Image (tube, rainbow, N blue to C red):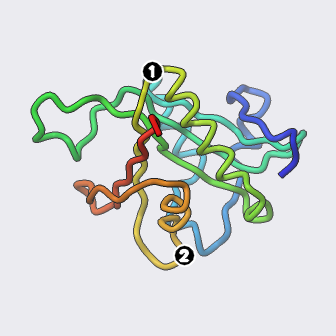
Amino acid sequence: MTATARLEALTPDNVLAACALEVAPGQRRFVAPVAQSLAEAYVHPGIAWPRLIRDGERVVGFVMAFFGAAFDHDARTPGAPLRSGLWRLAVAAGEQGRGYGRFAVGAVNEEIRRRGGTLSTVTWHPGEGGPEEFYLRLGYRRRGLTGDGERLGELDLTR
């Protein structure tokens, strides 16, 4: 990764580049296509925060955060706080292993802090070749399972 890595809001000028992003074939079962993420962002405009990951002028990935969302894992917990965290992360197949995923997660967590949050939530599909070890290396701790069987991780942002 170079020093020019940055997040960029989606616009009419870059949305097709975002939709063309492809992860490695073995990872497709772990992450939704960018087009699906953008459709979900469209119907959740106050919650979803989709961004391209660029290095210079190259599109190297896509990240989508969520802010202030009710979370199904907490549905039976009276007074459970709204959550913020990482909704989607996709690094292009040819760009993996260069720190872009770590950069994007860090940028999302900084945005959560900027908005006053102290906890980052992420979910992932378990399985060989999945993102679990990546999230655990970043400091997320397993908290349990979601209603649809995804792993739930949390990172305390006050530390």
Q: Considering only vertical position in the picture, is 33 above or below 46?
A: below
- How far apart, in angstroms, are the residues tagged by discs 2 and 1? 34 Å
Q: Nearer the viewer, mark 2 or mark 1?
A: 1
Q: Considering only vertical position in the picture, is 40 above or below 30?
A: above
| Mark 2 lies on residue | 129
Residue at the extreme bottom of the image, as rendered: 128
Q: Crowdedness of circle 1 by 10 Å Cα count: few (<14), some, many (20+)?
A: few
| Mark 1 lies on residue | 116
Coordinates of residue 119 in the picture (x, y in percent): 40, 37
* Amino acid type at image mark 2: Gly
Coordinates of residue 44 in the picture (x, y in percent): 42, 28
Labelled disc at residue 151: none
Q: Describe residue 59's horizontal placement relative to residue 34 as left or right.
A: right
Quadrant in which residue 27 is drawn: bottom right
Q: Crowdedness of circle 2 by 10 Å Cα count: few (<14), some, many (20+)?
A: few
* Residue at 49 percent of width and 54 percent of height: 139
* Amino acid type at image mark 1: Gly
* Residue at 47 percent of width and 40 percent of height: 159
* Residue at 27 percent of width and 32 percent of height: 70
Name the residue nearer the viewer: 110 or 52.
110
Coordinates of residue 54 in the picture (x, y in percent): 79, 41
SS of the residue under disc 1: loop
Quadrant in which residue 26 is drawn: bottom right
